Image: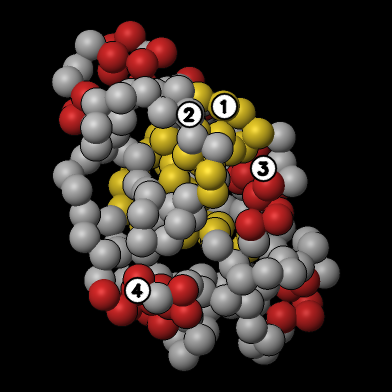
């Protein structure tokens, strides 16, 4: 994955999507617990549960600029992600060629919370705050045990760095990926992850 540069306007914490009382929010909230803090991750597409209302082109400015739209969504704040069982991996990262400890729940466990349809032939579109997006097969996410990392070397990751969320896997433990140069192991691993579209 090539190094990406954040747009200056998105570096401010206020650029993150937040929960808002848009029309239909009460009905959507009935399908899942509402987040209490700012929404860090929004899941849309083939999901059975929702805890926020449809896309709002005024309040959801970053999503609007990235041409996203949805009728329902399931959002996670930091506490909701931290409440899920966490996994620890220690991949060698391309940025310094050293092994680092990353911790967070399995990506598919996060999606199961939203009632996602996770067919083996399905795909997950993972999108970062700067618009970087990849299509990850569900089968690959399962086989390589992708996580949604919240912590790097014991510290929560910050916006403006690699966080606050990073979808990745332990490439050192996947033989066909470990055989590649480290700079070629993570093209499907967007840091600053904020949106996932489930495509059944």
Sequence-earlier tag: 2 or 3: 2
**Marks 4 and 1 in Cβ contact (< 8 Å):** no
SS for tag 4?
helix
At x 21% / y 40%, what residue is drawn? 1
Percent of width and height locating residue 198: 50, 50
SS for tag 2?
loop
SS for tag 1?
strand
Q: Which residue is mark 3?
A: 112
Is residue 87 shown above or below 83? above
Marks 4/1: CA–CA distance: 29 Å
Q: Residues within 10 Å of mark 3 (few under 14, many from 20)?
A: some
Does residue 114 appear to the left or right of 34 in the view shown? left
Q: Which residue is mark 1?
A: 88
Marks 2/3: CA–CA distance: 25 Å
At x 37% / y 23%, what residue is drawn? 99
**Marks 2 and 1 in Cβ contact (< 8 Å):** yes
């Amino acid at each position: 994955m090539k190094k990406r540069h954040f747009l200056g306007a998105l570096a401010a914490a206020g650029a993150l999507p937040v929960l808002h009382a848009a029309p239909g929010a009460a009905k959507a909230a009935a399908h899942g617990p509402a987040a209490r803090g700012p929404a860090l991750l929004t899941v849309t597409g083939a999901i059975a549960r929702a805890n926020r209302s449809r896309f709002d082109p005024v309040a959801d400015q970053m999503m609007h600029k990235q041409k996203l739209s949805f009728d329902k969504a399931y959002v996670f704040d930091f506490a909701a992600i931290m409440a899920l069982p966490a996994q620890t991996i220690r991949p060698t990262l391309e940025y310094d060629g050293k092994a680092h400890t990353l911790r967070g729940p399995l990506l598919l466990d996060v999606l199961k919370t939203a009632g996602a349809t996770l067919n083996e032939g399905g795909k997950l579109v993972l999108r970062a705050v700067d618009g970087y997006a990849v299509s990850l097969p569900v089968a690959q996410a399962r086989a390589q045990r992708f996580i949604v990392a919240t912590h790097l070397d014991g510290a929560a990751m910050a916006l403006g760095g690699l966080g606050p969320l990073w979808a990745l896997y332990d490439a050192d433990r996947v033989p066909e990926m470990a055989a590649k140069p480290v700079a070629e192991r993570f093209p499907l691993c967007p840091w600053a992850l904020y949106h996932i579209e489930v495509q059944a």
